[in-house]
Image: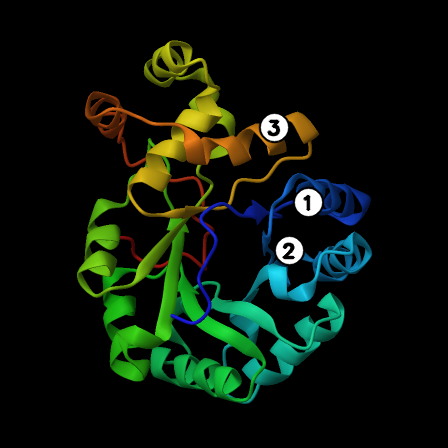
Amino acid sequence: MQHIIPSIGLGTFRLKDQVVIDSVRTGLELGYRHIDTAQIYGNEVEVGEAIAASGVPRGELFVTTKIWTDNLAGDKLIPSLKDSLAKLKLEQVDLTLIHWPSPGDAVPVAEYMQALLEARNAGLTGAIGISNFTIRHMREAIAAVGAEAIATNQVEIHPFLQNRAVAAFAREHGIHVTAYMPLAYGKVMQDPVIARIADRLRATPAQVALAWSLRQGYAVIPSSTRRANLEANLRAASLALTDDDMAAIAALDANERIANPEGIAPAWD
């Protein structure tokens, strides 16, 4: 794949106004080069401001945005992406995802995947992908554009929701997985199993949870507003978990889903 997704990115979900500007600015200062936003986050303008002010060469950055469900129709998708580019002050994003499958499948998967592929062919995005797609939706996306065109499926994955069926199907078809909410909104910091592993490795629980995802080949996009946490999260890439550590964390799976918006979320696997 021409556009390789950096393994650790900076998520911006729920970060707004000066808070997101500060988070992205600090992240870029610390060495983050993968920034993840979305149309529905309402922060593309601020993310673009932080990127522009950072002085980091565009060629070193990997910027992801996501198409909201209101913009999935074939005649709306590309105009909405152009609007996102204007807000971000970019001529091209590196990756554009379908944020959620169309609620109730009101818009066919083939329609918006083909429109997304058209956007890539027009140079508006370097790569395309999907988010929150079930196995059924992945099958339909593959049928529409081919698995080789799908750069990633960004789904909720953390020790308490391991999404194994979706991850296995993606791996079987050569589709990369990006784990969002990899820290389960801070719950990993209170888990005794993860805490014991962190103590032994002289690491933070967050680093352990991120290392667990990274070892499985997932990209991760944790968010933080604190410089110390942003810096610590980056160091998770060098943390070596044992097979016993991986097994202990695997045993924490409880199908505890955080992102499940009523009227939008599909029927999960």
Q: Is residue 48 above or below residue 72?
A: above
Q: Earlier in the sequence, mark 2 or mark 3?
A: 2
Question: At 45% from the left edge and 13% from the top edge, which residue is drawn?
Answer: 202
Question: At 48% from the left edge and 63% from the top edge, which residue is drawn?
Answer: 99
Q: Is residue 92 left or right of residue 105?
A: right
Q: Earlier in the sequence, mark 1 or mark 2?
A: 1
Q: Earlier in the sequence, mark 1 or mark 3?
A: 1
Q: Secondary structure at mark 2?
A: helix
Q: CA distance from mark 1 to mark 3?
A: 15 Å
Q: Secondary structure at mark 3?
A: helix
Q: Quick check: can you spot residue 269?
A: no
- Residue 8 horizontal/vertical position (percent): 49, 45
- Residue 97 horizontal/vertical position (percent): 48, 67
Q: Badge 2 is on which residue?
A: 41
- Residue 18 horizontal/vertical position (percent): 81, 45
Q: CA distance from mark 1 to mark 2?
A: 8 Å
Q: Quadrant of residue 39?
A: bottom right
The answer to whether the residue labelled 1 contacts the one labelled 2, judged by CB atoms less than 8 Å apart, is yes
Q: Nearer the viewer, residue 115 or 54?
A: 54
Q: Which of the colour schemes (rainbow, by chain, secondary structure, one colour) is used?
A: rainbow
**Figure label count:** 3
Q: CA distance from mark 2 to mark 3?
A: 22 Å
- Label 3 CA crowd tier, 10 Å (few <14, some 14–19, many 20+): some
Question: At 40% from the left edge and 28% from the top edge, which residue is drawn?
Answer: 239
Q: Badge 1 is on which residue?
A: 15
Front disc: 1 or 3:
3
At label 3, the amino acid type is: Asn
- Label 2 CA crowd tier, 10 Å (few <14, some 14–19, many 20+): some
Q: Badge 3 is on which residue?
A: 229
Q: Quick check: can you spot residue 233?
A: yes
